């Protein structure tokens, strides 16, 4: 659990409603902004594959952060 707290610090602070909403907004903004930037860069011919892979990893990070925020908010995990 300490490893998750290290990589997802915002998710484990969402035990109140305001912090939960802020956490969700932060993870959605990370996903949208990086998705747009990486989506544009993935069209480059030679290094597009690397940016496409990075975009998938950023999307996965945001998804896991949102799920952890929800689980902390409903007190399934601490």
Image (cartoon, rainbow, N blue to C red):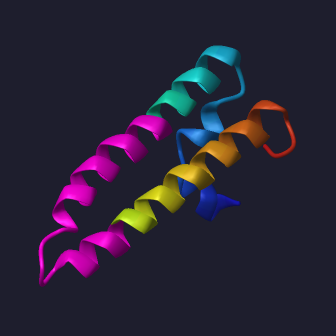
The residue depicted at 58 percent of the width and 48 percent of the height is: 65
- Count all numbered tags in the image, as a single digit: 0
The residue depicted at 12 percent of the width and 80 percent of the height is: 45
Q: Where in the figure is residue 71, as x and y percent of width and height?
A: 78, 42
Residue at the limit of the structure toward the top, as seen here? 18
Q: Quadrant of the N terminus?
A: bottom right
Q: In which quarter of the image is residue 54?
A: bottom left
Q: Is residue 24 left or right of residue 12?
A: left
- The dominant secondary structure in magenta is helix
Q: Where in the figure is residue 5, as x and y percent of width and height?
A: 60, 53
Q: In this view, does 38 lie to the left or right of 35?
A: left
Q: Where in the figure is residue 16, as x and y percent of width and height?
A: 70, 19
Q: What stretch is highlighted in magenta?
A: 27-54
The residue depicted at 53 percent of the width and 45 percent of the height is: 9
Q: In this view, does 74 lie to the left or right of 37?
A: right
Residue at the limit of the structure toward the bottom, as seen here? 46
User: Between residues 6 and 69, which one lies in front from this camera angle?
Assistant: 69
Residue at the limit of the structure toward the right, as seen here? 76
Q: Where in the figure is residue 57, as x and y percent of width and height?
A: 44, 67
In this rendering, is residue 45 above or below 70?
below
Magenta region includes residue 51: yes
In this rendering, is residue 77 above or below 43?
above
User: Between residues 63 and 41, which one lies in front from this camera angle?
Assistant: 41
In this rendering, is residue 75 above or below 18?
below
The residue depicted at 40 percent of the width and 36 percent of the height is: 29
Q: Quadrant of the C terminus?
A: top right
């Amino acid at each position: 659990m300490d490893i998750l707290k290290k990589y997802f610090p915002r998710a484990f602070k969402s035990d109140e409603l305001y912090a939960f909403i802020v956490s969700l907004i932060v993870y959605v903004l990370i996903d949208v902004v990086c998705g747009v930037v990486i989506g544009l860069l993935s069209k480059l011919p030679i290094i597009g594959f690397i940016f496409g892979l990075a975009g998938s990893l950023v999307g996965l990070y945001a998804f896991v952060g949102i799920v952890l925020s929800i689980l902390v908010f409903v007190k399934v995990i601490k």
